[in-house]
Amino acid sequence: MTNKKTLSIIFITVFIDLLGFGVLIPILPTFATKEIGISEFQIGVIVAIFSLMQFIFNPILGSLSDKIGRKLIIVSSLLLTSFSYLIFSITDSFFLLIISRMLAGIGGSNIGVAQAYIADITTKENRSKGMGMIGGAFGLGFVFGPLIGGFLSEFGYSIIGYVSASFSFLAFLVAFIYLPETKWVAKSDKIRIKLFDWKSAVSVLKIQKVGFLIFLFSSLIFAIANIYGTFALIGFKYYGFSDQQNGILFGISGLVGALIQVRGLKILSKNFREKELLSWGIFLMGIGLLLIPHGINFIGVAVIIAIMSIGTGLLQPILSSMISKYAPEHKQGEVLGVSQSISAFARVLGPLWGGWSFEYVSFSFPFYTGALVTLITLLIFNKIFKEETDV
């Protein structure tokens, strides 16, 4: 099977899985508010627990994929994700919702493995485009998933869980049947599993340039994660948006991000260096975060979300590509797994801060603090890479 066909299969697999994830995005905060009656901070906890599981399991699955192969990890995690959505369908308490999101977080810890899969079948020259396909799959999942979720909310929240489970199970079938293995290792290789391999993380962070880029990535993730739970809440509680309107806004975000990552990045990379594109991406993301509380109405918020999504659409594939380029070839799974894990920890802190500040400070505070962190990150990046000529 050619690399082009393999890339298409991994793209389809990630897209279908993220479609199921995207279905839940616009309705999870409102579901927790309407059906379970939990507070804004507890919603932040719900969002954070998903990322906490990714923080713990991303390096485990990344390193494990270096030992036993990428495919087994990918298909197993997809099956677990499907099961987590089935639990969501019967959720009627804070405890069950926590369990559902924990399992979904473990299952969703396969992104580093998917990126390592891309690294296995691409050269350093075209790796950015390959990573862009993963980003594009994310984007498209966030285009159609939230739209489907918003539409299905009219028929009950349990239906949304069953549909999400179906999507992830379909992704499992596609990967199990069509996805070839790329990582073959000797049977004598020992498998060691730790809840979090601090030694591995430290060794990865010591690699030249890799540590700084991972820190940069996690800072930006924290900034955007401030609004993971609060964006739907600000739409529901302060703008008066319905689940369908929130779904449309998330769909706009996914569409813009997908267009940037699938087409825009290819065009822009011919005329601009990665450093320049990354700087613009950080800037646009920060502007979007700053303006969200001042959108006035649905159209205004939609325009702001589009601007922010241009920035985030540039960031993910470029940073992942840069981290991969500086990583040793034999440690791609380990490095990308650690990167995803540390960024997942930022996704733990972001929603906790966002939910707390939304409830106890003001509805606009999560967005302002996200914009501030983004601005500081931009200044540090430009200072560190000012003399660099290879990015």
Image (tube, rainbow, N blue to C red):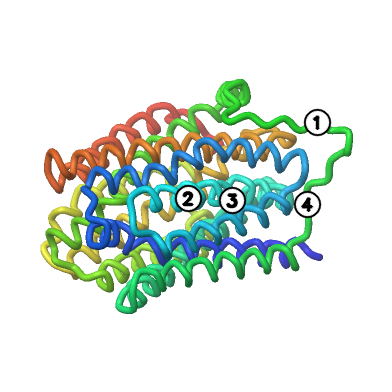
Q: Are discs 2 and 1 less than 8 Å apart at CB?
A: no
Label 3 Cα neighbours within 10 Å, binned few <14 / some 14-19 / many ≥20: many
Question: What residue is rendered at 36% in x and 52% in y?
Answer: 311
Instruction: Say which mark, if any, is on residue 190.
Output: 1
The reply to whether residue 264 is visible in this rendering is no
Residue that numbered label 4 is attached to? 182
What amino acid is found at the position of numbered circle 4 in the picture? Thr
Disc 1 secondary structure class: loop
In the displayed structure, 310 sits above or below 384; it is: below
Whole-angstrom CA distance, mark 4 to mark 1, is 19 Å
Horizontal side of 188 relative to 53 (left or right) equals right
Which is nearer the N-term, disc 2 or disc 1?
1
Question: What residue is rendered at 36% in x and 29% in y?
Answer: 380
In the displayed structure, 168 sits above or below 384; it is: below
Q: Position of residue 198 (x, y in %)?
A: 57, 23
Residue that numbered label 2 is attached to? 272
From the viewer's perspective, is the residue at label 4 or at label 2 nearer?
4
Q: Are discs 2 and 3 less than 8 Å apart at CB?
A: no
